[in-house]
Amino acid sequence: MPEVLKAPLVVEFPFTRSLGPVQSAFLTGLRERVVLGVRTGDGRTLVPPVEYDPVTAEEIRDLVEVAPTGTVTTWAWNHEPRRGQPLDTPFAWVLVRLDGADTALLHALDAPGPDAVRTGMRVRIRWAEDRSGAITDIACFEPYEGDPGKPAGHDGQFADMVTGIVAPARLDYVHSPGRAQSGYINALSEQRNVGERCPSCRKVYVPPRGACPTCGVATSERVEVGPRGTVTTYCIVNIKAKNLDIEVPYVYAHIALDGADLALHGRIGGIPYDQVRMGLRVEPVWTEGGRHPDHYRPTGEPDADYETYKELL
């Protein structure tokens, strides 16, 4: 039985956003160890604050300070904390209605075990030592048996307001490519490109998917294509990617390998970026030990006629 391929993959990007007056005051307040909510027209106090009333959709900006103490309204135990979560030991996710608020705030509760957590228990904020104006300025909640906290009545006006945040987004997962793509990957390690032919429409798909995307039938007949191909379309990249040692500008192109009915993408090298064009004939360049082409370079052949690749754009 062939080896089942799998590999850990990460999709990660920073999301940068500006803040309106309500969110700006809320996050700046956390930096200053002040929790602010927003009061609606009917007198409810919402924490975390929002800029529009969820019932009437009216804009709301009436900021009001609430206490750093509160009551757990519901909870769930987290046995195995993941990377980037508030605590690195088992903890409870809790919804806490802070004293003075009418809605609950989601955060972590530091507790020795699930038996120490209950709905209705009293808690207080444990502030992070280093604060920058983010929800992580609340390190977590902790059990608390004292008197309710007393807000000072802060009006939400601070010096040096937080006006924007960068929220990192990341997804870690293990990918198993399946039979068709495993065959494709194994062939690449031998510097070959292998696709699969649809038994109905007879099109050859590279990389193969295990089924024809047009006819919906399974594919199994393997067909070696290339190694040369034709640039069908391309883009010029002007922004340097993190952890990618390629100087900008450079070109990424869709390349229709000879014998294939689907264009794959690859980087074009060996030619100035402004000389890349549709119809350019290219061939793969492999690095020693590489499991896929490092880039494609011009073959020196005449450009392909548009009619030969127009269906692959």
Image (cartoon, grey):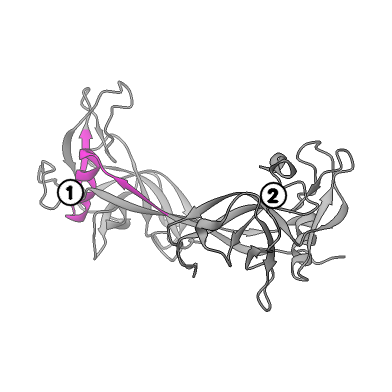
Q: Nearer the viewer, residue 38 or 159?
A: 159
Above or below for 38 versus 272: above
Does residue 283 belong to the magenta stretch? no
Can you tell which of label 1 and label 2 is closer to the viewer?
A: 2
Question: From which residue to which does the magenta span run?
Answer: 14-38
- Decide if residue 276 is in sight here: yes
Could you tell me which residue is drawn at 46 percent across and 60 percent down? 249
Determine whether the residue tagged by mark 2 lies in a helix, strand or loop: loop
Is disc 1 in contact with disc 2, using a CB cutoff of under 8 Å?
A: no
Label 2 CA crowd tier, 10 Å (few <14, some 14–19, many 20+): many
Give, as a three-letter code, the residue at label 1: Gly
Horizontal arrangement in the rendering, residue 29 relative to residue 140 (left or right):
left
Label 1 CA crowd tier, 10 Å (few <14, some 14–19, many 20+): some
Could you tell me which residue is drawn at 33 percent across and 27 percent down? 54
Horizontal arrangement in the rendering, residue 250 relative to residue 145 (left or right):
right
Residue 205 drawn at (x, y percent): 77, 49
Determine whether the residue tagged by mark 1 lies in a helix, strand or loop: loop
Corner quadrant of residue 100:
top left
Residue 193 drawn at (x, y percent): 77, 61
Residue 170 drawn at (x, y percent): 48, 56
Residue 247 drawn at (x, y percent): 46, 67
- Decide if residue 292 is in sight here: no
Name the residue beneath numbered marker 1: 149
Q: Nearer the viewer, residue 34 or 174?
A: 174
Above or below for 259 versus 295: above
Mark drawn on residue 263: 2
